[in-house]
């Protein structure tokens, strides 16, 4: 473990500087969450040797509830990080020299979930209700409420973590969750839920975007590495989505083996991911794509939720994707 | 605490030991039935099933967590012993560095984890969090032990021409051992918790990852199985440390000393010079902290976007155009945190003292409550908070319960140890005069334990502040603990660093007040010359 990280550190110094004479380029990707199907793409790519084929000796580092993705990427300890587009934008607004180079979740998965026998069907229904939300996610909820002409003070915010127990236990009436996560896990435990997406109310930030530093984008060698990473990751996702059960099995027997992941639940979650990652837009432009309309939608969302910055569109750098998909959306 | 090391276990004794376990199980089943609708309390058999199901993956996770916790425990405690000796031998080191040790205990984890993960390789950030969780508590226990050597023996050594270092070797180090082992006991669950919080940063395996996985999948029996495994481990390490302690210090409670333990700093000189010394000490500590803080940022060339310097914080709070606004934002949170920590500390301390006395009087109480107390201390708060919040609500009562749990345990351990270590001769004198065991407790043991209450306040008061920030983050959503997490998520690092400085300042101030009160009480009781 120490050696792996030390390698990551080495790669950091040169931001993935290539030493083609002496073998593959060492690089690492910092995930925002633990190793489960949410991160199937990179793990399938690792498993199938797609990074290797691009000449990259890749390390994929799992995250967790307290992951510090942006500082790790800014400091060069990871070449690429994964997080929500608006979170990256806030870091940039504070001076982090970061650029988003690809987008995994084309539709934002943030969902308001309630119990089926006590449903909360719309955003407006939240007035006078108790809403469980991660402490770190409160600013987004406040902004979406305000953006839809509601007063955040009308909704009682109750801090919760990733554990949906407070909703089932009756501590709150609704729970901010990810479409492909908690509702499915609750269903697997026999709890029926009712959900609606926040994207229906103008929250359109991309999820699990791949981002890197401006410095890495300015360097020809690390650009090549970044192209390789984006290409291999897209291929990994392509495989994962064309056989979601196999991807779930890989996560259960491979990276998630020590967590005793539940295969059926991972299969369900993986299937649910398909529509978030594969859209009409990616059919035309390839997986992980960032279309002009998509970027405009993200910028609009960020403005709505008060992300500071005059030129939020400059946060997105499509040049890596353009190079990867120079010959169309099919990847060889 | 005597679960180990009793030579004879009679059949009746065994039944007495099993009774509390059976009672706990019954209560558990009852709670599971009561909360069945809410699905927050699983049945014991569901938990057992989950435990058996996860048996194959425990070794891989346990080995990672235990290795990191052990390294952190070892390094943190070793540094604490060295620091304690240095503090006691060279007074100005203590004057300069003790505040920094307090800061190390109270620094909100969310503030330092970005730096730790960037600066340190591999698992070292997790080990560092474990070491940080144990350093201060062991330091305080050791200082208490080192200073508890009776002054008459010091005088003997001095009169025979012994130097300060002879004194250290011949008396103080021996006197330190009981304190050291008490500290090592408290440190065991803390190291495990620090590691698990470290695993929340991201890890391929470990008990913390297992907990995150099962909590986010709403696999409640698995969550409980994992949490109970953590508690059992903590209790085991706790018992082993206690057992080694008793083997290594067989004389505790058997020696003839009549002095009570004294943790207070050595006597100060005149009033004026003591004020000068205090001011120089405070300024020195601030200079050292700022220099170290700034030096770390420069040495590792940390990005200014997340690593704010002392100058940034000063600007944010004092010279910026919005400084007044920034200050009131932080002070509003700090006020709530002070309330949360204060009430929780008081209730936790009173409960711990009452239980400690009960433990001395009725062995059954010890058998029943000590395992429960250890369990409460070692179940990770992150796993326990939903349950506590469900039972006690998310208001002041809930946060009070969580803070009490944090402060209760160190106080209980120290006070029980102090009650036990009351000199045997003094106890015998009272008994020979016809005193019952209640009289012994009232006349001898309690007097002996007063310094322990204040010594443990040195740990429990900063601990209450740390516990309050954690509860605010996980349960109430108010106060500075919640603000820091929101600031981090929104990359508001100026606010986060300023809030961190505020929490640390509050902790150091609280610590100074506790020390002052301790000295005052010590003087009133005639235990400080």
Image (cartoon, rainbow, N blue to C red):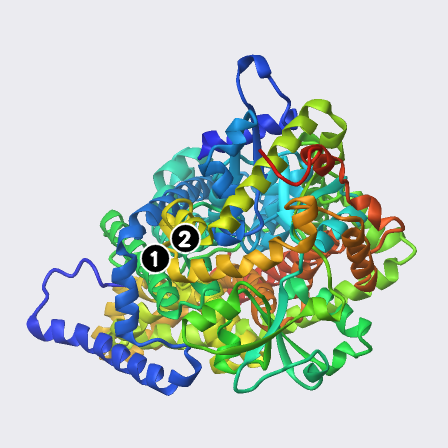
Chain letter of the residue beneath label 2 in the structure image: B
| Image coordinates for residue B403, horizontal then vertical, percent | 52, 70
Tell me if residue A201 comes above or below residue B511 in the rendering.
Answer: below
- Nearest the viewer among B97 and A27 is A27
Chain letter of the residue beneath label 1 in the structure image: B
Secondary structure found at label 1: helix
- Nearest the viewer among B393 and B99 is B393
Q: Are marks 1 and 2 in contact (CB under 8 Å)?
A: yes
Horizontal relation, residue B101 to residue B430: left or right: right
**Image point (55%, 46%), residue name:** A237
Whether residue A133 can be seen here? no
Give the number of the disc on residue B234: 1
Secondary structure found at label 2: helix
Q: Residue furthest left?
A: B11
Tell me if residue B219 comes above or below residue B116 in the rendering.
Answer: below
| Image coordinates for residue A264, horizontal then vertical, percent | 39, 61
Cα separation, mark 1 vs mark 2, equals 7 Å
| Image coordinates for residue A109, horizontal then vertical, percent | 62, 62
**Image point (48%, 42%), residue name:** A44
């Amino acid at each position: 473990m120490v050696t792996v990280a030390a390698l990551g550190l080495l790669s950091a110094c040169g931001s993935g500087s290539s030493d083609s004479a002496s073998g593959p380029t060492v690089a690492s990707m910092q995930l925002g969450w633990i190793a489960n199907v949410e991160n199937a793409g990179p793990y399938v790519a690792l498993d199938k040797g797609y990074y290797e084929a691009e000449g990259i000796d890749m390390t994929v580092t799992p995250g967790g509830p307290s992951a510090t993705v942006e500082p790790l990427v800014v400091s060069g300890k990871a070449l690429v990080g994964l997080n929500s587009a608006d979170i990256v934008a806030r870091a940039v607004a504070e001076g982090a020299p970061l650029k988003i180079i690809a987008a995994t979740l084309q539709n934002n998965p943030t969902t308001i979930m309630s119990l089926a026998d006590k449903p909360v069907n719309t955003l407006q229904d939240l007035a006078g209700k108790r809403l469980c939300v991660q402490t770190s996610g409160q600013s987004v909820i406040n902004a979406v409420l305000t953006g839809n002409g509601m007063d955040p003070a009308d909704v009682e915010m109750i801090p919760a973590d990733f554990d949906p127990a407070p909703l089932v236990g009756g501590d709150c009436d609704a729970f901010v969750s990810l479409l492909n996560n908690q509702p499915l896990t609750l269903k697997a435990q026999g709890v029926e839920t009712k959900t609606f997406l926040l994207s229906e109310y103008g929250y359109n930030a991309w999820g699990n975007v791949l981002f890197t530093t401006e410095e890495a984008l300015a360097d020809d060698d690390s650009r090549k590495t970044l192209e390789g990473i984006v290409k291999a990751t897209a291929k990994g996702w392509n495989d994962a989505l064309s056989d979601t059960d196999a991807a779930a099995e890989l996560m259960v027997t491979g990276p998630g083996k020590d967590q005793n992941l539940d295969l059926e639940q991972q299969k369900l979650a993986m299937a649910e991911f398909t529509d978030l990652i594969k859209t009409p837009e990616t059919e035309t432009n390839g997986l992980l794509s960032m279309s002009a309309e998509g970027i405009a939608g993200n910028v609009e969302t960020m403005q709505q939720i008060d992300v500071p910055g005059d030129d939020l569109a400059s946060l997105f750098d499509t040049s890596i994707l353009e190079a990867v998909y120079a010959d169309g959306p099919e990847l060889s | 605490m005597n679960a180990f090391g009793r030579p004879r276990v009679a059949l009746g004794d065994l039944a007495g030991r099993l009774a509390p376990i059976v009672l706990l199980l019954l209560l558990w089943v009852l709670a599971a039935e009561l909360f069945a609708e809410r699905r927050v309390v699983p049945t014991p058999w569901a938990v057992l099933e989950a435990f058996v199901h996860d048996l194959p993956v425990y070794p891989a996770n346990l080995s990672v967590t235990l290795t990191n916790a052990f390294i952190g425990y070892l390094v943190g405690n070793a540094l604490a012993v060295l620091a304690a000796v240095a503090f006691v031998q060279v007074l100005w080191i203590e004057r300069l560095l003790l505040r920094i040790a307090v800061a190390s205990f109270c620094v909100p984890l969310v503030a330092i984890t970005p730096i730790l993960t960037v600066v340190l390789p591999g698992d070292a950030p997790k080990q560092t969090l474990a070491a940080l969780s144990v350093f201060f508590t062991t330091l305080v226990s050791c200082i208490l032990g080192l200073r508890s050597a009776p002054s008459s023996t010091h005088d003997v050594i001095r009169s025979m021409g012994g130097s300060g270092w002879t004194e250290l070797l011949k008396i103080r180090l021996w006197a330190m051992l009981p304190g050291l082992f008490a500290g090592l006991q408290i440190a065991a669950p803390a190291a495990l918790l620090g590691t698990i919080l470290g695993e929340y940063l991201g890890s391929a395996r470990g008990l913390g990852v297992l907990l995150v996985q099962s909590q986010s999948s709403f696999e409640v029996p698995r969550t409980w199985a994992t949490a109970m495994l953590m508690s059992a481990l903590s209790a085991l390490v706790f018992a082993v440390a206690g057992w080694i302690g008793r083997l290594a210090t067989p004389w505790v409670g058997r020696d003839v000393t009549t002095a009570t333990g004294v943790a207070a700093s050595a006597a100060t000189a005149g009033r004026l010079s003591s004020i000068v010394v205090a001011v120089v000490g405070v300024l020195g500590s601030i200079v050292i902290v700022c220099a170290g803080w700034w030096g770390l940022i420069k040495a590792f060339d940390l990005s200014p976007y997340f690593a704010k310097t002392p100058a940034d914080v000063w600007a944010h709070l004092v010279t910026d155009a919005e400084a007044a606004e920034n200050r009131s934002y932080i002070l509003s949170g700090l006020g709530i945190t002070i309330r949360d920590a204060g009430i929780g500390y008081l209730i936790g301390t009173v409960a711990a003292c009452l239980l400690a006395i009960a433990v001395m009087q009725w062995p059954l109480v010890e058998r029943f409550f000590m395992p429960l107390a250890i369990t409460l201390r070692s179940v990770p708060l992150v796993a326990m908070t939903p349950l506590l919040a469900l039972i006690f609500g998310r208001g002041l009562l809930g946060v009070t319960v969580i803070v009490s749990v944090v402060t209760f345990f160190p106080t209980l351990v120290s006070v029980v140890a102090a009650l036990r270590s009351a000199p045997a001769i003094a106890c015998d004198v009272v008994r020979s005069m016809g005193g019952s065991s209640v009289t012994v407790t009232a006349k001898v043991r309690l007097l002996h334990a007063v310094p322990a209450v204040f010594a443990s306040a040195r740990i429990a008061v900063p601990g209450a502040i740390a516990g309050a920030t954690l509860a605010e983050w996980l349960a109430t959503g108010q106060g500075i603990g919640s603000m820091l997490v929101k600031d981090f998520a929104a990359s508001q690092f100026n606010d986060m660093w300023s809030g961190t400085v505020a929490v640390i300042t509050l902790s150091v101030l609280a610590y100074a007040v506790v020390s002052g009160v301790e000295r005052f009480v010590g003087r009133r009781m005639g235990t400080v010359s």
